[in-house]
Image (cartoon, helix red, strand yellow):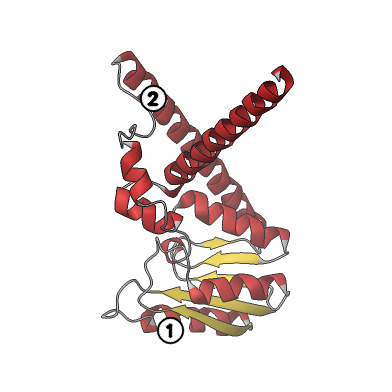
Amino acid sequence: MTAAVYARVSTADQTCENQLLELRRYTAARGWTATEYVDNAVSGTADRRPALDRLVQDAKRRRFDVLVVWRLDRLGRNLRHLVALLDDLQVLGVAFVSLAEGIDATTPAGRLQMHLLAAIAEFERGRIVERVRAGLERARRQGKRLGRRPYDIPDARFEQVAGLSLRAAATQLGVSRSVVHRWRLSGRREASGMRQSGQNQAVAGDLSD
């Protein structure tokens, strides 16, 4: 069986060597051929992790049969992210082992543990949704405005940045690019309406002659 070994540390003054020593011993004891994927000085909350991204791509290419980690928090940003990642690997036919938690999804007991993790993640997701809805409802009852703060910028300020790009104009005005874009669209519609009104008046004048 071919294994992918993943290790990660968050800061430059830490080392993955202790994790890798245990992972190497484990895969050797199981008789597995291992390929190592190591993220050094990469936070667990980072959206992009080069070694993990490469691992996922290799999983899609069926380059290994099982993923082995030292501990669950080395792999996932949070429980929901972890379960989603493991679900993707399961669909690809990749098993999972975590040494610290004693999870071995190559066995029936390990697969049961994975189902329990998924159930806990679903419960956590539902609780978050409930808290968000309760917070919004409380804010409404207290008369608080929800959503973005309204902007109060005179047309003259928009006209001053009319020659700039959307990004530059938005930065100078301290608003989002969509605000500048909407203002420019409304200005074009008004100008178009004025031209159309003038044309209609001209036509009416010609007819009256």
Q: Residue furthest top?
A: 141
Q: Is residue 143 above or below residue 172?
A: above
Quadrant of the drawing holding the C terminus: top right
Which residue shows up at 66% across the image and 22% down it? Answer: 205
Task: State which quarter of the image contains the N terminus.
Answer: bottom right
Report how far apart the C-alphas of labels 2 and 1 lie in the structure: 49 Å
Q: Residue 85, position in %: x, y?
A: 58, 58
Tell me the kind of residue under disc 1. Answer: Leu
Q: Where 97 falls versus 79 (above or below)? A: below
What residue is shown with label 1? 21
Residue at image coords 68%, 59%: 90
Q: Which residue is labeled 2 in the image?
A: 136
Q: Residue at x 70, y 17 (%)?
A: 208
| Disc 2, SS | helix
The foreground one among 146 and 201 is 201
First in sequence: mark 2 or mark 1?
1
x and y, in percent, of residue 122 in the image = 54, 39
Which three-letter amino acid code belongs to the residue tagged 2? Leu
